[in-house]
Image: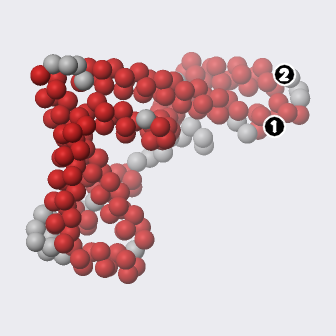
Amino acid sequence: MLLIDWIAVGVIGVSLLIGLLLGFGKLLKIFTGGIVGIIISIVVTYFCLGIVSSWGFVQDIMAKLIGAMQNANNGIVDFLIKIGIEKIILAVGLFIIIQVIRIILVSIIKSIVEIDNVVFKVINKFFGVIFMVGISCMVALIVFHVIQLIGGGTLESVRSGMEGSTFKIDWVFDHNPLQYIIQKVVPPTAFN
């Protein structure tokens, strides 16, 4: 086994232990709270904005807002129309709605999986292990992607250190699914 294989075994072992000790409810609260929760809400808002802005009643509201502002005939209002204030208002409103939904969902899920019952304790620990291992794998894929973006000598050095990995980490590095997802995701057209 190579050094990268031993590192993978260590990371998975620590992830299993953390998932088992904390459980799904606490891990979900940790990974969706604070700045990470805000980042999650921003990403969800970004991907939902194109869909929401294409809805007919949202377009009608935005058109009415612009029409009302154009009647004001004021320099500040003209500037706000020029920068697309209706799209900014929509994005901020959608972000607030997604934040509230995220907080409510996390609280409900955390409350359910942390019920003081043997069955729910087992479920909480089981999904805690799965969740933590999943987070560790996602972080590894992000690190692999960043290394591929850096390229050059760093890429060659890391890639040669993985060659012949027992757990086929070199294959995962070469066929990173995150790379495929990033290339195939089409950004919403809300701000075009």
Q: Is residue 25 left or right of residue 100?
A: left
Q: Is residue 7 left or right of residue 81?
A: left
Instruction: Looking at this view, name the residue that lies furthest to the right.
Output: 74
Q: Is residue 188 above or below residue 152?
A: above
Task: Tell me the number on the disc at residue 166.
Answer: none
Dot 2 falls on a residue whose secondary structure is loop
Q: Position of residue 185 (x, y in %)?
A: 40, 48
Alpha carbon of mark 2 to alpha carbon of mark 1: how far? 14 Å
Q: Position of residue 93 (x, y in %)?
A: 58, 26
Query: Residue visible at 15% across and 35% down?
Result: 126
Total labels drawn? 2
Residue behind mark 1: 79
Instruction: Check disc 2: other Cα within 10 Å, few if <14, some if 14-19, many if 20+.
Output: few
Q: Examine the rendering and report whether any part of residue 62 can be seen.
A: yes
Dot 1 falls on a residue whose secondary structure is helix
Residue behind mark 2: 71
Query: Residue visible at 89% across and 34% down?
Result: 75
Query: Residue visible at 85% across and 33% down?
Result: 76
Q: Is residue 3 above or below residue 115?
A: below
Q: Which amino acid, mark 2?
A: Asn
Could you tell me which quadrant the C terminus lies in? top right
Q: Position of residue 146 (x, y in %)?
A: 39, 64
Nearest to the observer: residue 108 or residue 148: 108
Q: Which amino acid, mark 1?
A: Phe
Could you tell me which quadrant the N terminus lies in? bottom left
Q: Examine the rendering and report whether any part of residue 178 can be seen.
A: no
Q: Is residue 87 left or right of residue 128?
A: right
Instruction: Check disc 1: other Cα within 10 Å, few if <14, some if 14-19, many if 20+.
Output: few
